[in-house]
Amino acid sequence: MTKEGSTEEKILFGKYRLLHKLGTGRTGTVWLALHLGLEEYRAIKCVPRTCADYETFRREALILKELQHPGIPMIYDLEEDPEYFYLIEEYLQGYSLYTLIKCQGTLKQADAVRYGMQICGLVEYMHSACKQPILYLDLQPHNLIICNGTVKLIDFDHAASCLDANQEEQRYGTVGCAAPEQYTSDGILDQRTDVYAIGAVLRFMLTGTLKQGVFAPQIVTEPLQSIIEKCMEPNMDRRYESAKELNSVLRRLCIRELTVNNDHRAGPSLIINLAGVRPGAGITHLSLGLLHFLTIQGYEVLYEEHNRSQAVRTLARQVNARPDRRGIYSVNGCFMKPWYGPAVRLEEPLDFSVVLRDYGTDWKILLEESARDHVLVTAVTDSAWEACYIQRAVSALMDQQDLYKGKKAVFIFRHAGQGYSGRRFHIRDWNGLLKQSLLYRSPEYRDPFSRDRSTQLFFRSLWDGISGEAGTERSKRGWLKGWDTAKGAVLRAAGTLRPDAGSSGSSEREGERG
Ligand SMILES: Nc1ncnc2c1ncn2[C@@H]1O[C@H](COP(=O)(O)OP(=O)(O)OP(=O)(O)O)[C@@H](O)[C@H]1O
């Protein structure tokens, strides 16, 4: 093993080049290593033989072997030499939740709840993946890694099946996160022990400390405060029964917070109406991408086909999916309702918080039906010669000023910055529209169900804009990035140099407000 601070190159087992130290824990040091043959990164945990016996060390590897989840690192191998044991696992590129909060400050309630739901999902998986629930028992901010906005879990050296955990003589945990029953040798440990720690992590995201104390009401609303207090009840019978139950409670809170309508009708909190400026502009592809993104973020979201493309049935056929009694298909874990036509009467699904309505290119119907709803998204074509389609879409919106007023409109451009140069056309009152719109540039993605980084970043930024979090630093950066490229292209295309189309100066100012 490389000695502390040594810069000497070290190759382990003839195939892993140690690059740098990722971190040091109570038992060992974790290195970033390059697998020389595969040219892939690995995280290698090196535990001195003096700190653990082989069986204890192997237990972490065996638990990781059982757990196969995108939020949990894959285990590749176990090795040993005279001084150390080595655990070779998937490298998770990101920052620990601890570092994130210490460097960037505490999170807004909506972000903390979203991460909280992801953490519940991970813990819920551990509790249900094997015959016996696997208890994690050391959930704390250092053990949660944020990779592109997704939470991942590391360090399974205290994880154990419920049976084994209760038989252990010694108990571990992190002060501030460990439940009271972990401090005694005879207290019963079960799923609720991890629920306690989720409460502590939620508190940490909002306050930046693991110390218990009174929440400032301007930071945390009363319902979330009660949820955290219930997680951290000293008497485990008063806590949530499981991470699953806690997850649903957080989801319900999230829906309530998302509600932008003040009329309390049953049904979704947010309806997003989508239309493309021409057939083939990619609105269905975009809608399915947004559906998938929101689904993996833990939202209860439904895609409704309000056009005759038959896209849902085509997708469903590919995976042999069958509709439920409400006519809804589940494809890749995403819920979709195909177009049934006006004659078919099906039970209204009321359990979705977000509904994405894909109107194809039917602007007339969209504007008629969407009078009460708030977000209009349009996919915009990418070639300069098709600019007339954009004009038509914009005119349709501007003609419906009354309906459109107060709603959020989002325009998404594909390839913006490449296709428009040199062409000019006139869009009536383009600047008026811009005042109420968000503009995004979409990356190219072939598969709407892909999890690749740029696609996920794009949908995160889009969702932040739609759900009203466009003021946060992170989404502002994402939005401006898209805007910078789209802005020039759109304004060039809209012929902003013409006096009757508004000055580029005023449009620039709109852009800067982002
Ligand atoms: N798979 C991984 N990918 C990226 N970084 C990792 C990975 N595993 C561990 N790390 C980094 O190494 C640090 C120490 O790892 P880990 O917590 O597993 O060690 P430990 O000795 O078991 O710690 P503990 O004292 O919490 O038991 C982590 O805080 C993290 O920064």
Image: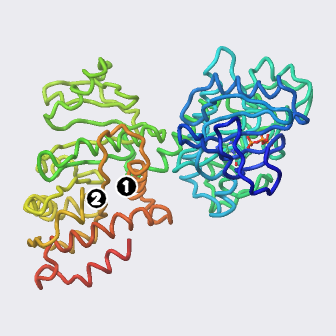
Q: Position of residue 484 (x, y in %)?
A: 33, 70
Asked whether mark 2 and ligand 1 are closer than 8 Å, the reply comes as no
Q: Position of residue 514 (x, y in %)?
A: 38, 71
Mark 1 neighbour class, 10 Å CA radius: few under 14, some 14 to 19, many 20 or more? many
Cα separation between marks 1 and 2 = 9 Å
Residue depicted at x 66% and y 58%: 101
Mark 2 neighbour class, 10 Å CA radius: few under 14, some 14 to 19, many 20 or more? many
Q: Position of residue 383 (x, y in %)?
A: 14, 59
| In this picture, residue 228 sits left or right of residue 352 | right
| In this picture, residue 276 sits left or right of residue 129 | left
Residue type at mark 2: give it: Val
Q: Which residue is mark 2?
A: 410
Identify the mark at residue 462; answer none if there is no mark: 1
In the rendered image, the vertical position of residue 264 relative to residue 88, given as above or below: below
* Residue lying farthest to the top in this orientation: 131
| Upstream in sequence: badge 1 or badge 2 | 2
Residue depicted at x 63% and y 60%: 219
Q: Nearer the viewer, residue 422 or 142?
A: 422
